[in-house]
Image (spheres, rainbow, N blue to C red):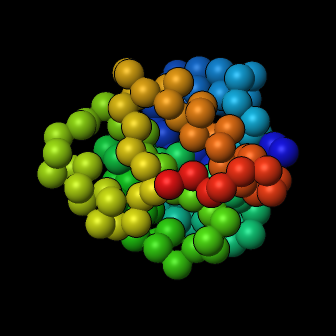
C-alpha cells in the first residue's frame, strides 16, 4: 500500500531532495507540501482525509512546526504525524511528543528510520502489520 504524505519544509532544496528520495524508496507519495505554518495549517484544515502521514519540520521561515502539531492533535487514528528536524535537544523532542508527534527523526541521521517507519505505517494501513508506535 502507498500512503499519502504531506510535507512541511521551508527550504526548497531539502523539500525537493526529500520528496524525490522518499517517493523512490518508501511506500509513499506526497499529496501536498507547505513552506510555512499558516499554509500547512490551511492545507491540513481543508484536506482532513487526504493524508496518512504528515512530516513536519519544526523551525520554519514563517511560523513553526509546533503550531502544525497542535492542529494535528484531533486527527484520525490512521493518520500519523512525525517531526523531521535538525534540532535534537531533549526539551524540544519532549515538547513534540507532548503535542502529539508520533515520532521524531533527525534530518541528518534518521532518514533510514523514517523510511522504515513509512513502511510499517503503510503495512498497518494495508492490514498486514501492527500500527507503528
Residue 96 on image: x %, y %: 31, 57
Front in this rendered view, residue 42 or 8: 8
Residue at image point 69% right, 72% down: 48
Residue 45 on image: x %, y %: 61, 72
Residue at image point 37% right, 21% down: 108
Give the left or right position of residue 76, taking residue 86 as reference. Answer: right
Residue at image point 71% right, 23% down: 25
Count of numbered marks? 0
Residue 86 on image: x %, y %: 31, 31
Asked if residue 99 shows in the view, the reply is yes
Which of the image's four quarters has the N terminus? top right
Give the left or right position of residue 66, taking residue 29 as reference. Answer: left
Residue 42 on image: x %, y %: 58, 67
Q: Is residue 102 above or below residue 46?
A: above
Give the left or right position of residue 98, taking residue 73 as reference. Answer: left
Asked if residue 31 shows in the view, the reply is no
Query: Would you identify the image quadrant in which residue 115 lies?
Result: top right
Front in this rendered view, residue 111 or 37: 111
Front in this rendered view, residue 63 or 8: 8
Q: Is residue 92 above or below residue 79?
A: above
Residue at image point 75% right, 36% down: 27
Looking at this view, name the residue that lies furthest to the front.
129
Amino acid at each position: 500500500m502507498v500512503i499519502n504524505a504531506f510535507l512541511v519544509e521551508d527550504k526548497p532544496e531539502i523539500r525537493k531532495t526529500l520528496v524525490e528520495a522518499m517517493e523512490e524508496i518508501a511506500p509513499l507519495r506526497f499529496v501536498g507540501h507547505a513552506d510555512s505554518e499558516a499554509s500547512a495549517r490551511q492545507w491540513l484544515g481543508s484536506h482532513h482525509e487526504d493524508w496518512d502521514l504528515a512530516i513536519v519540520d519544526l523551525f520554519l521561515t514563517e511560523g513553526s512546526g509546533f503550531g502544525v502539531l497542535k492542529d494535528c492533535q484531533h486527527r484520525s487514528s490512521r493518520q500519523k504525524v512525525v517531526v523531521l528536524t535538525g534540532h535534537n535537544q531533549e526539551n524540544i523532542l519532549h515538547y513534540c511528543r507532548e503535542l502529539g508527534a508520533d515520532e521524531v527523526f533527525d534530518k541528518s541521521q534518521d532518514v533510514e528510520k523514517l523510511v522504515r517507519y513509512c513502511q510499517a505505517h503503510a503495512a498497518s494501513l494495508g492490514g498486514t502489520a501492527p500500527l507503528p508506535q
